[in-house]
Image (cartoon, rainbow, N blue to C red):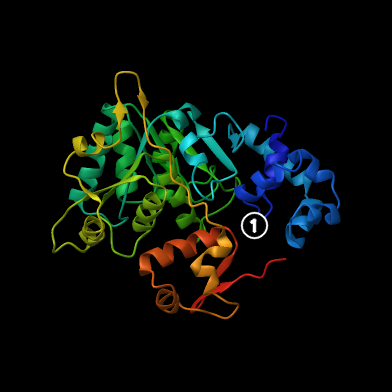
Amino acid sequence: MKNLSILHSLALHTCKGLGIATIDALQMKCDLPSLFKLSSKELKQLGLNEVLAEQLCNIDWGYLQRVEAHCQAQDIAIISYFDTRYPTLLREIASAPLILFCKGNTALLTEPQIAVVGSRSATATGLEIASDFAYRLNSAGLTVTSGLARGIDGAAHKGALAHNGATIAVLGTGVDIIYPKRHNLLYQQVYERGLLISEFLPGCGPQANHFPRRNRIISGLSLGVVLVEAEIKSGSLITARYALEQNREVFAVPGSIKNPLAQGCHYLLKQGAKLTECVEDIIEDVSFLSQNGLYSIESVIKNDSPQEDCPILQNLGFEVTSIDTLTQRTQWPVDRVTARLLDLELEDKVERVLDGYIKLARG
């Protein structure tokens, strides 16, 4: 979509509930830039609900121009889903971000990547493993991707920086926000030698629901995800679940049965993740061709079934329904239920409330 300007991409990006699937369907019917010239009635005739139609009719163009100017001033590249620089693997996932805000070496987006994630409260041993793995993965020509969080994430970035700096940090804030503050120096080093990216508008501060969302990007960019020390209930396991749904490899580093931070990795090993003791265990599984810097990977298998056929939506009403109830109704394992609920929440089809989830009304 070469005629879709940065400003038009930003406008679509700011429309809550407008995902890539809807945008792809719309461009089969009309040129996307023409959407902003249509009335609410005409937009609804294209299949949009009233909420989306009203948003498209009331774009704050002045605000978006200020965002674009701010990005130019702060050396923030804006890469849309239709840009040739957009990562191929990420384009193939469900709920791919429409826009990536980038600071640093955007050429890394086209390089083969491995994600290294884990606990924020990692042990000294876990930090050493993450750093060493990242260093050796870089040595093998793989870019290391993580989330700039405390613990394993930070150690992975530092290990990659110690080699050649090929590391990507996916943020749960705006790309111009340093979080956590203790990573101020690390943030600057990744900016100077690697790449910082975010789907959130510049200036957006940390919000609890943003960090699970960014995890789908960490796994979506990567050929595989390595977990080093992870609790059973953790963001790292969310990343692993996304990796499995995106048909990526999942690698788990085992630990002591007495270490609670090893429980998540051991759980994944029971589910079929590859037991990983060294970097060679990873490289042999990602079809990496070191002699020319290219890699091969089977096409990602998408879930093409319509959302209306999703058992979660079929068993979720406008009253509060707990995860336990949904597990009983769908006969799905609880981890699959929670993963699907997160996807539906990203698509603004369900909302998490105090005691469970509710379905959101459609216009």
Above or below 149: residue 296: above
- Quadrant location of the N terminus in the rendered image: top right
| Label 1 environment density (alpha carbons within 10 Å; few <14, some 14–19, many ≥20) | some
Q: Which of 359 and 203 is in front in this view?
A: 359
Q: Is residue 102 left or right of residue 362?
A: left
Q: Nearer the viewer, residue 128 or 305?
A: 305
Name which residue lies at 16% across and 55% down. Answer: 255
Q: In this view, does 23 lie to the left or right of 159?
A: right
Q: Which residue lies furthest to the top in this view?
A: 291
Indicate the position of residue 110 as horizontal and vertical percent values.
45, 29
From this viewpoint, is residue 66 visible? no
Indicate the position of residue 320 as horizontal and vertical percent values.
54, 80
Q: Which of 77 and 338 is in front in this view?
A: 338
Q: Which image quadrant for residue 323?
A: bottom left
Q: Mark 1 points at which residue?
A: 17
Give the amino acid at mark 1.
Gly
Is label 1 in a helix, a strand or a loop?
loop
From this viewpoint, is residue 101 visible? yes
Q: Nearer the viewer, residue 114 or 25?
A: 25
Q: Is residue 300 left or right of residue 102?
A: left
- Quadrant location of the C terminus in the rendered image: bottom right
Indicate the position of residue 25 as horizontal and vertical percent values.
67, 47
